[in-house]
Amino acid sequence: MSILLWISSQILSLQGSVHLLEQRIEERKKDLARLQQTATKLTACKSDFVDKKSLCMQPELGTTTWHGELATAFDNFRKEQLHVSYMAIPNEQMSATMGELQ
């Protein structure tokens, strides 16, 4: 009789373990779904960000806006540093984050 009680307690223990594992699986499925949604949103944000790269080069500098040595220096700064830094965000930082999500 005691063996039957032991077997019964083992079965109950296993059932409890299975239930806990099923709950963990459900939690992981929800986490995975959230990560997939985040990756999709991040991809859309990355596309929007790249599409707006021309905004950091505006306004065009010309004789009707601003010209001279300072204007040239500022324009060179925008082309050589600002644009490179701007593009580093989607090309390096966002790509690295997306890689971590996957």
Image (cartoon, rainbow, N blue to C red):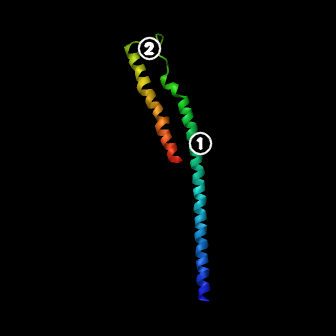
Outermost residue toward the top in this view: 63
Residue 55, horizontal then vertical, whole percent: 51, 25
Measure the alpha-carbon separation of dots 1 and 2. Answer: 41 Å
Asked whether, in this view, residue 86 is left or right of residue 38, the answer is left
Q: In front of the other: label 1 or label 2?
A: 1
State the count of labels. 2
Q: Earlier in the sequence, mark 1 or mark 2?
A: 1
Quarter in which the N terminus is drawn: bottom right
Which residue matches tag 1?
Answer: 40
Element class at badge 1: helix
Element class at badge 2: loop
Residue 48, horizontal then vertical, whole percent: 56, 33
Indicate the amino acid at tag 1. Answer: Thr
Label 1 neighbour load within 10 Å: few <14, some 14-19, many 20+:
few
Indicate the amino acid at tag 2. Answer: Trp
Residue 45, horizontal then vertical, whole percent: 56, 37
What label sits on residue 66 in the rendered view?
2
Vertical arrangement, residue 94 with respect to residue 54, above or below: below
Which residue sits at x=59%, y=88%?
Answer: 2
- Would you identify the image quadrant in which residue 4 lies? bottom right
In contact (CB < 8 Å): disc 1 and disc 2 = no
What label sits on residue 11 in the rendered view?
none
Label 2 neighbour load within 10 Å: few <14, some 14-19, many 20+:
few
Vertical arrangement, residue 19 with respect to residue 91, above or below: below
Asked whether, in this view, residue 26 is left or right of residue 60, the answer is right
Residue 62, horizontal then vertical, whole percent: 47, 13
Which residue sits at x=60%, y=63%?
Answer: 23
Which residue sits at x=43%, y=31%?
Answer: 85
Outermost residue toward the bottom in this view: 1
Which residue sits at x=60%, y=54%?
Answer: 30
